[in-house]
Image: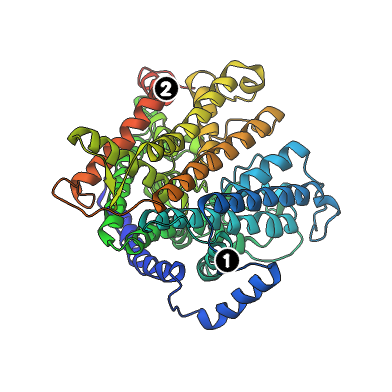
Amino acid sequence: MKNMDFLQIAIFFIALLLLAIPLGRYMTKVYEKEKTCPDKILLPLEKLIYRLAGIDANCKMNWREYLAAVLCFNLIGILVLFLILLLQGVLPLNPQGFAGLKWDLALNTAVSFVTNTNWQAYSGESTMSYLSQMTGLTVQNFLSAATGMVVVIALIRGLRRREGNTIGNFWVDLVRTILWILLPLSIVGAVLLASQGVIQNFSHYLTYTTINGGQQTLAMGPVASQEAIKMLGTNGGGFMNANSAHPFENPTPFSNLLEMLFIFLIPVGLTLTFGRMTGNIKQGKVILAAMLILFALGLSVCYGAEDSGNPLLQSAGTSNSLSMEGKDVRFGLVNDTLFTTITTAASCGAVNNMHDSLTPMGGFIPMLQIMLGEVVFGGVGSGLYGMLVFVILTVFIVGLMVGRTPEYLGKKIESREIKMATLAVLVPAATILLFSATAAVTPAGTSSIANPGPHGLSEILYAFASGAGNNGSAFAGLNANTLFFNLGMALAMLTGRFGVIIPVLAIAGSMAAKKTVAANAGTFETTGPLFAGLLVGVVLIIGALTFFPALALGPIVEHFLMWGGKVF
């Protein structure tokens, strides 16, 4: 790695920790209802919302009631967004006169944004009205991010509670997440991005005459407001089709740095919030350390593969600078690969380069990070509760090794928790593999492939991994706007999101009801480097055992074929 590249990566992580540490403290205060700076403004607004909505803020929910609220809220969100997209053509704030979406694309998009996936089987600037972008997509960017955050807070309460059966109030958690955390951060983020040149207006699209006499239309719109929350909420859906490679979404190297920081900011902060809420900050730090190790491994492989480039081009005497094909020359190879690794580690899906143009091993890492279960930082909230599932599995495996009942945070891990944790891991994995297999052997699936051979399989694998992993990025060679993929991806996104949330909340309820037992000489330490290493190993082993056969037929075999002189 070149010295300047290493320096840029180091600057990113230093800035990230300097921002995430105070944010972690602040979020702890928000969820513990301690005094914070915005209270004078937000507390009256919070009470007004409860009064208008008929919410009893003092009511505590058990895990089934909490889950019912989560599912009902998200089901209503899908229905409302589906109707907005269907009726777009007759609704206001549509200066370009875009028609309503076809029902299958509208359903796919509604499910996509409500599940925090933001998979886009359409071109934003030629499909969506300003109303759809703002009241539909941007609103769901807030709500879907908040849903992930409140679920992990409910799990934390279940882990720390002493013999209770309640894990909080979904509606209170949701309102406080949006008012105290997401809205303030998004306002600051939008202003910073607008200062760099990200557009924010309601103008008609502008048409100009180019220097050679042609006509070029420039898309306009309220971009900065959506850009901020799409990054902070790890949503990823771009206002423009080119996403964060478009100069109106990501105009400068500083805006590129800001967007990468926004993606990791809340996931990193939540690990520290977890430590503080459980009363042992080391518990949060060891999870953060495991995530950092996994991320460093992924970044090293991705950067190394892209820096090496394509050997066929080098043997032909072509400059290795062509490893920049599909990348943004404004930011350079290191910032493109860093962005790629960040957005797929964090389940964001925003892109500043073409993932389909990555070398086989460069594309292997983003795909694997999504397949691992959204745990290498992951989405806001969902990354941490996904990693806590692996923590439970790791503790269980260690318990088997030493021959005693496993414990975590003073509570015994028993059959029910292991069953739920196993479901949370297997449901998304099975969804990815079964849907990919179906697409690979049916005309409806293979007809959308743009490239033959193993790269075509990689396009399918990446698509369903992105859907079930709630990431939203893609190998763009796949034509996903078909009935098969719109419906298949919608089902994969729903399964990947709620197939994990349901067992996670069940674990929260089960753990809340358990007695806390005192630590003794036989208690395995879960705050040291040994546990961090074991946690990393469990994540990698489960991922390898589950997905290696499929990956071997896709990016891995493509890598060896490339070195053998064949490309796709």
| Disc on the earlier residue, 1 or 2 | 1
Circle 2 is placed at which residue position? 558
User: Amino acid type of disc 1?
Assistant: Val
- Which secondary structure, mark 2? helix
Circle 1 is placed at which residue position? 175
Height in image: 137 above or below 540? below
Q: Could you say which is closer to the camera, residue 197 or residue 123?
A: 123
Q: Is residue 560 left or right of residue 445?
A: left
- Which secondary structure, mark 1? helix
Q: Could you say which is closer to the camera, residue 330 or residue 491?
A: 491
- Seen from this angle, which residue lies furthest right? 90
Residue placed at 80% from the left, 58% from the top?
95
Mark 2 burial class by Cα count in 10 Å: few <14, some 14-19, many 20+: many
Residue 223 position, x and y percent, is 63, 60
- Seen from this angle, which residue lies furthest bottom? 40
Residue 100 position, x and y percent, is 80, 46
Residue placed at 41% from the left, 29% from the top?
360
Residue 177 position, x and y percent, is 52, 64
Residue placed at 68% from the left, 46% from the top?
110
Q: Is residue 496 visible?
A: yes
Q: Which mark lies nearer to you, 1 or 2?
A: 1
Q: Is residue 214 visible?
A: no
Residue placed at 55% from the left, 33% from the top?
463
Q: Is residue 332 left or right of residue 523?
A: right
Spatial CA span between label 1 and label 2 = 48 Å
Height in image: 80 above or below 52? above
